[in-house]
Image (tube, helix red, strand yellow):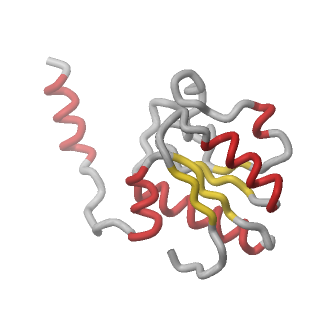
Amino acid sequence: MESLLPVICLMGPTAAGKTALSVDIAKTFGAEIVSVDSTLIYRGMAIGTAKPTKAEQCGIPHHLLDILDPQQSFSAAEFRTQALLHIKTIQQQGKIPLLTGGTMLYFHALFNGLAELPAADPVIRRRLVDQSER
């Protein structure tokens, strides 16, 4: 990451207690939560994902939560771009970003970057989808 300002990371598996702890940390330090979870970005995916409840979210800004419909794709590279924007904005407001989640690829992408690879070829992708449906 480009920033040297403080960032708190809370990572671990689903149902480990990250949400409750992140809410306590955010309230104590005035932090804003940035979700680092590949399932929580999707709307309507509350079951099986341990998505923070409305009560848990109350009064604490949460970022990268419920931003896409399930049929939309979202790569680790897209996550990195979005997360860095949120982190920068939070820090510019004098607050601490609290990165919470269990998608280790997203944490890796955020802190170490990703290999420069070309975007998916839509023609090849369509051909593969057609082939898989036969």
Circle count: 0
Q: Residue furthest top?
A: 134
Establish if 96 lies above or below 102: below
- Classify the position of the C terminus by image quarter: top left
Q: Is residue 80 left or right of residue 112?
A: right
Residue 95 location (% of width, % of height): 77, 68
134 or 16, nearer to the observer: 16
Q: Residue furthest right?
A: 59
Residue 51 location (% of width, % of height): 62, 33
Residue 107 location (% of width, % of height): 45, 58
Q: Is residue 120 left or right of residue 83?
A: left
Q: Is residue 23 left or right of residue 41?
A: right
- The residue depicted at 80 percent of the width and 73 percent of the height is 94
- The residue depicted at 82 percent of the width and 57 percent of the height is 28
- The residue depicted at 52 percent of the width and 24 percent of the height is 48
| Quarter where residue 126 is shown | top left
- The residue depicted at 61 percent of the width and 48 percent of the height is 64
Residue 15 location (% of width, % of height): 54, 33
125 or 73, nearer to the observer: 73
Establish if 93 lies above or below 66: below
Establish if 47 lies above or below 37: above
| Quarter where residue 18 is shown | top right
